[in-house]
Image (tube, rainbow, N blue to C red):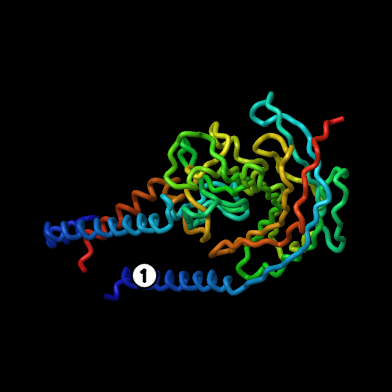
Amino acid sequence: MHTIYARINNTSAFLSSCVTALLVAIALSSLAFTADPKGQLAVASIQVHPGNARRYANKKQEFAFVNFNVSAGTHLVMSARAVSHVHACSKPDLSPLFNWNTKQLFLYLSAEYTDKKGVANEVVIWDRIVRRKEDALISTTGRNKYVFRELSASFRNIPPANYSLKYNVMPYVGVLTYGEAARTPQPVAFPELQSLS
Amino acid sequence: MFADELKTLRRLGFRHVLLQVLNFMSVLASGFMMWKGLGLVTNTESPIVVVLSGSMEPAFHRGDLLFLTNPLDQRYQAGDITVYKIPGADIPIVHRVLETHDGVTIKKGRIAASRIAHDQLLLTKGDNNYIDDLELYQGLEWLERQHIVGKVRGFLPYVGYVTIAMNDFPQLKYALLGGLGLLALVQRE
């Protein structure tokens, strides 16, 4: 009854149930934080250039290039289609998303459009990992990190796309949650193909 | 060293050994039933997976546990973290969805088990990788729903490291299994 084996057994069982209860409590507690921060996002322009497909070097493929500017304060209006950059401007302060169970935020900027055949597309063109609350005021200038291409290899006759900044809150323990921080007020049209030089 | 244990074993008799073996098997069977039941509820072949690589760091490290679901009526969205298994590859991969294209099929003339089962094309990327996973797809151009094991819904750090340790050091596995089996045999109550 009071052997060392029994004592070890009881102690470790008690400890592990305590740890489990604590972890469950922490995971449930993060459901009580319901921050939903919002910013604005505006796209200035897009550039479409011809190129070659990645796998098949002789296959033509068009690429869209998106320059955006996520910055504090300034809010750019949508400029003319002739301008050859996309400016996405927003000031989302995502620090309310950081609570005691937030390990990191995964931010991503995605383009959403449905083509005329009804194929719905969602393409992530930029992302960022935010690990500290101090870095959660998003203010940056950049261009798309990932290639933006269309399934049909061409952006001709593709309807305008919506751009949105979304986040994934990743906890130390528990459930992963998702949300949207900003979205372009109107869909942004793709420009005509530009040839290089 | 084992003289005492052997003596108790002889004293307890053959029937006791049989009973303990039966107990051990019923524990195994109920564990297997719970695993498969969870798989039925979540609609995935493995509802709990262990992270094996560092390609999703700093979010997921080696040895973290992930809880998956794969609801049949939900499409995957960009930003979701999926676990996928390419035919021919031996281990499943945990990466984030970078592109989704809904309503397209690659191969015509195949009968889908579900209306949405085959009409979504996905491209994934590990958070810690610089480029997308095209090189990992072993010749496939896109991931399809049939390759997806599930979507990551929950996270528990470190716990899965036990299985990695047992894989890396097989002696540990045999020692653990042997010790448990011996304990089950000689235990009196």
Graded by Cα atoms within 10 Å as few (under 14), some (14 to 19) or many (20 or more), the crowding at tag 1 reads few
| B155 or B102, nearer to the observer | B102
User: As displayed, is residue A131 above or below residue B113?
Assistant: below
Dividing the picture into quarters, in which one does residue A46 lie? top right
Residue A158: x and y, percent? 71, 42
User: In the drawing, does residue B181 fall left or right of residue A110?
Assistant: left
**Amino acid bearing label 1:** Ile
| B54 or B80, nearer to the observer | B80
Q: Residue at x 39, y 45 (%)?
A: B170
Would residue B160 be visible to someone looking at this image?
yes
Q: Residue at x 32, y 55 (%)?
A: B32
| B157 or B148, nearer to the observer | B148
Quadrant location of the N terminus of chain A? bottom left
Residue A41: x and y, percent? 78, 58
Q: Residue at x 54, y 64 (%)?
A: A175
Quadrant location of the C terminus of chain A? top right
User: In the drawing, does residue B41 fall left or right of residue B9?
Assistant: right
Circle 1 residue: A8
As helix, strand or loop, the secondary structure at mark 1 comes to: helix
Q: Residue at x 13, y 62 (%)?
A: B12
Residue B147: x and y, percent? 49, 42
Dividing the picture into quarters, in which one does residue A93 lie? bottom right
Name the chain under label 1. A
